[in-house]
Image: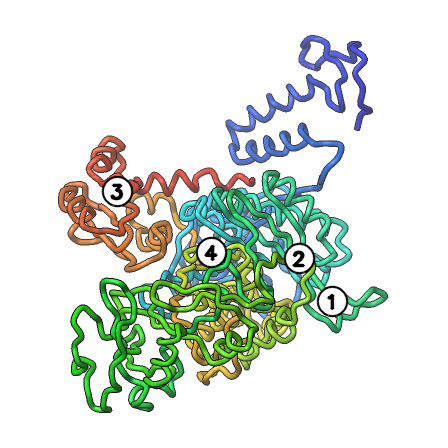
Amino acid sequence: MAEAYDDGRPDRRCKDGGKPTYRTGWRWDCQMSRLTDLIRQTKERDPLLAAELEREFRSLSSRRAFGLNFERHRPEAVELPGRPVRRGDKARILPPRGSSVRDDQRLWRVTRIERTADQRLGHLEPLSGDDGEPITVPAEDLVVVAEFRDPVFPGLVPTGGVYRGGDQPVHTVINGENFHVLHALSYTHQGKVDAIYIDPPYNTGARDWKYNNDYVEADDLYRHSKWLAFMERRLLLAKELLNPTGSVLVVTIDEKEYLRLGMLLQQIFPGATMQMVSSTINPKGTGRVNEFRRVDEYLYFLWFGQAHVSKVDIEGTAMSGGSVQGLDWQTARRRDLASVRPTRPSQFFPIYVDTASGMIDAVGEPLPRDAKREDAPVRPGCLAVFPIRPDGTEMNWSVGKPAFVDRWKRGYARSGRPRPDEPQQYIIQYLKSGTIRDIEEGRASVTGREPDGSVIGVYESAQAKTPTTQWRAASHSAEHYGTGVVKSLLPDRTFPFPKALYAVEDALRIFISERPEAVVLDFFAGSGTTAHAVMRLNKQDGGRRRSISVTNNEVSAKEAGVLRSRGLRPGDSEWEALGIFEHVTRPRITAAITGVTSGDDPVKGDYKFTDEFPMAEGFEENAEFFTLTYENPVAVGHNRAFERVAVLLWLRAGAEGRRIDTVAKVGWDVSDTYGILFDLDQTAAFCGATGKANRLRIAFIVTDDDRRFQAVARQLHDSVEPVRLYESYLSNFRFTGIEP
């Protein structure tokens, strides 16, 4: 690199005969001009390559003498096992079954697919001219590859779900390459995510992550720059998802990369408020050869807009500025299956809620075993509330009538928010005896009362306390409340180094305790701890927060060796069944919600700290599982792939209520929060239906004609966002193949 100076003297002439230039900084003006010309010429032949060269050119031309400089390496690529091979695909050739040789990393272009009597053959030509001659191989020996510089057109295929939460929003769990899923979320959630919590690979050199389908080993000379390139690509996409009016990004890391990560975060998010917290996760320490024993890890917090640090007791409850969250209000309806009516007749009685005020007006007598709810006496102006699960199952209240009335009269029981569309139309809450004892013995103080007489209180030890930058909470032990919790939920399965459930819960609580409808994203979801933590926060305050969890279905290096020795390869059902998504993430979230283990037994043990209750009770939440697909833009544009993009439209509308999964025969459909007009001849009927939908947010209008789109849009209510399909979808992804 040339020495930096500028003496004002001509240095040399440009090769194209241009005027003399001067040596300024480290570059020749004519060299830069020549590079610009070459990039312009390249655009005519290969726009993607030209865009990539232009990005690198800008990076080099603006590189600073001080700051985080690193090699970005060649674009990443992801293998898509199980995806059918089509003409035009990029692909790799898999090693023979049973072979342990390293995968062939060369990329080939599929020029055509030939069907013979007994198999499909792929005709290939090398993607690079130096990689050999055209060849033909069985299609089953090929795995499709998507490079990150290639535009992708994503879809989502539903693969099941768990539904226990009535009208609660749905937690979304996606199996897919997180870089591509983040692109998909740029269409559905741009500027809408309130919190991102990620636990990325720590780059320890212990085969804990891959770059371009290869594990990054400890002796890789480019290990750190590969990791930075890997993180930068994803953080730049995540930046577009964060809510600019108020949101938080939390990234955990250990000492191997925390310095580089800190500088990277500062460069990507220059406007954020940023702090690092040290958290003890293993008081005994993890032994390392010729190194200090590691007891902690680090959390980077970056917050934006109006987001602020709430006053929180790290092992207790968020104070939320002195609100009722200081006391642990519990749902009065029992959840365990052993408490289904009529097991305890004395605990099945009507609680009369005044429909005008929403307050408890009276408590009725327990109903006989054979009596129907409709037999309960009617109280004018009141609704008789019974302990009924969303699926209609009759349960019991947690205490009998005398104990409940005593709590109610003393301000230790209350009615919560209404749920008019559910069998139990009001949440009924109460304080457990332990919390009441804390109030009576001075460990908690009553600071006021609500209009219905229920107490407002705080724990003295937690009042008005801002968290410090050093956390030594016993609840953050990864051994007991990470590995231990996963073991309780999945007794027959293991997952390396899961986060402590309560550590994630506390980190989120600091910023979203006052945001009951927050959207929380984790695109390194692993075992699903973040989704689990969001469910706990919802239970504690009746919130409607929803999580988005993203992970791939990769198997561990050790497991992959065993599977290969058995003649299995990626894409085989036995191989895929042992991937992270299928073997851990999906069953862990399912077990957390249902309270039933992967072996169909009630989960043993209790949740602790902020909210204590049996794990077998589960949560009144909903979750759906999806797999990312790669669609043909022509098929999408011609409305032939609607079912694959239907989930994206539902997510964009808030992931609530009924999903429109098929093209309606009448030419339009309106669901809870969105509608779709397929046939513009049905505009009048469609607009009439949207006018009656009180919660409608978005109207998707399928048309290639912008004038007709505008004509429909003008007939919609001002509160409804009109979106043109499929132009909005295609334009969103058409240029996203260029790396950030």
Q: CA distance from mark 2 to mark 1?
A: 18 Å
Query: Looking at the image, is mark 2 or mark 1 earlier in the sequence?
Result: 1
Q: Amino acid at mark 2?
A: Thr
**Dot 1 and dot 4 residues touching (CB under 8 Å):** no
**Label 1: how many residues lie within 10 Å, few (<14), some (14-19) or many (20+)?**
some
Which residue extends farthest right? 290
Q: CA distance from mark 2 to mark 4?
A: 20 Å
Q: CA distance from mark 3 to mark 1?
A: 55 Å
**Label 2: how many residues lie within 10 Å, few (<14), some (14-19) or many (20+)?**
few
Q: Nearer the viewer, residue 206 or 650?
A: 650
Q: Amino acid at mark 3?
A: Ile
Task: Name the secondary structure under disc 3.
Answer: strand
Q: On the image, which quarter does residue 497 sit in?
A: bottom right
Q: Is residue 145 left or right of residue 448?
A: right
Q: Which residue is mark 2?
A: 468
Q: Which residue is mark 4?
A: 514
Point out the frontmost of discs 3 and 1. 1
Q: Which residue is mark 1?
A: 295
Task: Name the secondary structure under disc 2.
Answer: loop
Q: Nearer the viewer, residue 287 or 126?
A: 287
Point out the frontmost of discs 2 and 3. 2
Point out the frontmost of discs 1 and 4. 4
Q: On the image, which quarter does residue 715 sit in?
A: top left
Please indicate, yes or no, whether residue 120 appears anywhere in the rendered image. no
**Label 3: how many residues lie within 10 Å, few (<14), some (14-19) or many (20+)?**
many
Query: Looking at the image, is mark 4 or mark 3 earlier in the sequence?
Result: 4
Does 101 appear above or below 686?
Answer: below
Give the image location of residue 20, x and y in percent.
Answer: 72, 9
